[in-house]
Image (spheres, grey):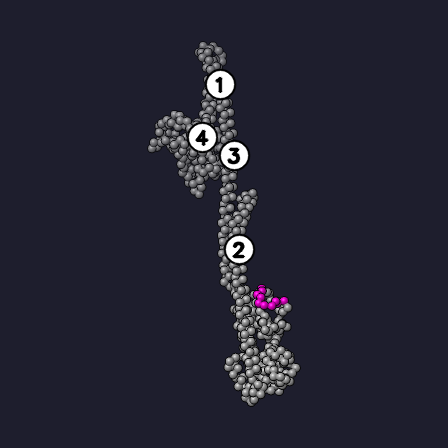
């Protein structure tokens, strides 16, 4: 493929790919982002609902424990609770109803334990300096943050104050952190989700599932988290993309954090995206291969048509030159015939004047007679040449004449006889003498025979042989032109009569001779066939109907 046509093929391929694939990609991207946005918004709404429900459950858990202690503190006296065995009985009753208390204690206004039940030796502890004690004495009810305290383990307490004049005391209970952690973690979603509580100082109140311990510093900026319930997309310091819900508890300055891995939640959407991408890639490859194939095929056909048109233009120009040459030859033949007629007449007159007496009495009489005879012979020869030239230069429209095939073959051979002798090619004539006259176009038959003889001369080398034969066969006259050249390869025999097909070297043939001859014979009601065996020559048969 030439550079110009290659550039055209590349341009057609690029434009076709853009026109075919751009809408496909745009539609696919639009569909994906549309459904991705819908799923993302749905996930946020579900996470927001989950955070609302879970923060309500945590608030209800704390309110219930606080209310139980308040009822117990307000309906019982300090003396009744500090009696031996009374607090243990109350503690057992509380854990049967609310199984989240670790211990229970009665503390006077000085911070001293009046009574205690639990697994730790805290009976002699004084809490007058503990932050939770001072807050409870001031506010009446208090839920502490998680702290270590005398136990040395993270925990938080719920304390309520009983006021009876100047004699105030506190009922304090420690909440089981494992129960509370399980309550918080019940909001976890999937294999990579997390749920934990952080206080306003940024300390973990429950341990996170991934990275971080209880009371460790959280990497969240607490000041940037607005009040209420919010769902945001964020990236952790280790590069993870998370969908996070923030929910502040209404009665405690704690922040519930629920993390969800969107890839896990969007698994079906991601799978659909991967399938869509795979289908899109396969479709793109198929479309691209089809476009490249079709574009190159179209350009090759265009190139072939341009080449055929160029060859046809050249043949038309050549035919135009031949027409002009034929007209000129006809004019020259006519111009030559006029002086030839005069020369013939004068030679005949001189021949009549030279009688027997002149030849005997004149010393050069016999020479005069011999030269006049030669002049008349040469005039006849030139006249036959001009007649053949005029016959070949006739117009190509079919014109029925009474034609002697052998005479047409002899005339056609006479045009190429000298060329055959120069090439050293031997031409055998095997013309049957019992052929009838045919009603056909003489000039067009002559062109067919000339084309076949020309092809035969081009096919054989020096010392080759051509056989020109004619015979009568089954209501038709068959003319054969056989040569002993290389023959026609089997793979191209079906294309012999195609326009512009030739086996000759570039510049030595246009590929129109056999095509034109085939067309002429079809117009005349005949046909052309051939037989060829590679390496043993070829024989073309011209079938001319007798009637």
> Which residue is the site of mark 1?
338
Secondary structure, mark 2, is helix
User: Which callout, 1 or 2, points to the residue nearer the camera?
Assistant: 2
Q: Are marks 1 and 4 in contact (CB under 8 Å)?
A: no
Distance of mark 2 from mark 3, alpha carbons? 56 Å
Q: Tell me which residue sits at (54%, 71%) in the image.
A: 56
What range is drawn magenta here?
224-233
Q: Earlier in the sequence, mark 1 or mark 4?
A: 1
> Which residue is the site of mark 3?
314
Image-based side of 427 in relation to 73, left or right: left
User: Viewer-proximal residue, 134 or 204?
Assistant: 134
Q: Earlier in the sequence, mark 3 or mark 4?
A: 3
Distance of mark 1 from mark 4, alpha carbons? 27 Å
> Which residue is the site of mark 4?
447
Secondary structure, mark 3, is helix
Residue 226 is a magenta residue: yes
Residue 268 is a magenta residue: no
Badge 3: residue crowd in 10 Å (few <14, some 14–19, many ≥20): few
Q: Earlier in the sequence, mark 1 or mark 2?
A: 2
């Amino acid at each position: 493929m030439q550079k110009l046509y290659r550039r055209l093929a590349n341009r057609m391929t690029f434009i076709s790919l853009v026109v075919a694939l751009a809408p496909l990609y745009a539609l696919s991207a639009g569909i994906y982002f549309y459904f991705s946005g819908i799923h993302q918004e749905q996930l946020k709404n579900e996470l927001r609902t989950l955070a609302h429900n879970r923060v309500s459950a945590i608030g209800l858990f704390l309110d219930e424990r606080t209310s139980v202690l308040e009822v117990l503190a307000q309906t019982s006296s300090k003396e009744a609770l500090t009696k031996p065995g009374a607090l243990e009985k109350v503690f057992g009753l509380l854990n049967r109803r609310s199984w989240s208390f670790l211990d229970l204690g009665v503390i006077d206004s000085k911070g001293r334990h009046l009574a205690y039940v639990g697994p730790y030796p805290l009976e002699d502890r004084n809490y007058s300096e503990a932050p939770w004690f001072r807050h409870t004495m001031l506010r009446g009810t208090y839920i502490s943050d998680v702290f270590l305290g005398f136990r040395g383990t993270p925990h938080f307490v719920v304390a309520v104050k009983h006021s009876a004049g100047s004699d105030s005391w506190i009922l304090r209970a420690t909440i089981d952190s494992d129960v509370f952690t399980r309550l918080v973690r019940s909001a976890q979603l999937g294999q990579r989700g997390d749920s934990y509580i952080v206080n306003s100082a940024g300390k973990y109140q429950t341990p996170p599932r991934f990275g971080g311990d209880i009371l460790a510093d959280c990497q969240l900026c607490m000041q940037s988290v607005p009040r209420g319930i919010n769902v945001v997309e964020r990236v952790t310091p280790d590069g993870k993309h998370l969908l996070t819900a923030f929910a502040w508890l209404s009665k405690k300055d704690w922040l519930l954090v629920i993390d969800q891995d969107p890839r896990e939640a969007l698994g079906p959407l991601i799978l659909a995206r991967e399938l869509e991408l795979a289908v899109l890639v396969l479709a793109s490859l198929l479309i691209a291969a089809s476009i490249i194939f079709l574009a190159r095929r179209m350009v090759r056909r265009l190139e072939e048509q341009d080449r055929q048109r160029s060859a046809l233009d050249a043949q038309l120009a050549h035919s135009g030159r031949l027409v002009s040459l034929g007209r000129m030859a006809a004019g020259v033949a006519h111009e030559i015939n006029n002086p030839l007629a005069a020369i013939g007449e004068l030679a005949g007159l001189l021949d009549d004047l030279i009688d027997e007496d002149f030849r005997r009495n004149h010393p050069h009489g016999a020479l005069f007679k011999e030269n006049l005879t030669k002049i008349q012979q040469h005039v006849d020869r030139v006249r036959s040449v001009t007649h053949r030239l005029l016959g070949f230069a006739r117009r190509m429209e079919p014109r029925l004449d009474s034609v002697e095939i052998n005479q047409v073959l002899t005339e056609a051979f006479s045009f190429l006889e000298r060329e055959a002798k120069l090439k050293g090619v031997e031409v055998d004539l095997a013309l049957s003498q019992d052929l009838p006259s045919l009603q056909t176009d003489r000039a067009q038959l002559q062109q067919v025979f000339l084309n076949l003889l020309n092809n035969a001369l081009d096919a054989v080398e020096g010392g080759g042989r051509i056989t020109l034969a004619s015979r009568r066969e089954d209501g038709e006259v068959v003319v054969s032109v056989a040569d002993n050249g290389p023959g026609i390869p089997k793979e191209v025999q079906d294309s012999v009569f195609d326009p512009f097909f030739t086996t000759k070297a570039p510049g030595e043939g246009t590929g129109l001779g056999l095509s034109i001859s085939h067309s002429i014979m079809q117009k005349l009601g005949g046909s052309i066939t051939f037989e060829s065996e590679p390496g043993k020559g070829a024989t073309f048969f011209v079938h001319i109907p007798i009637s």
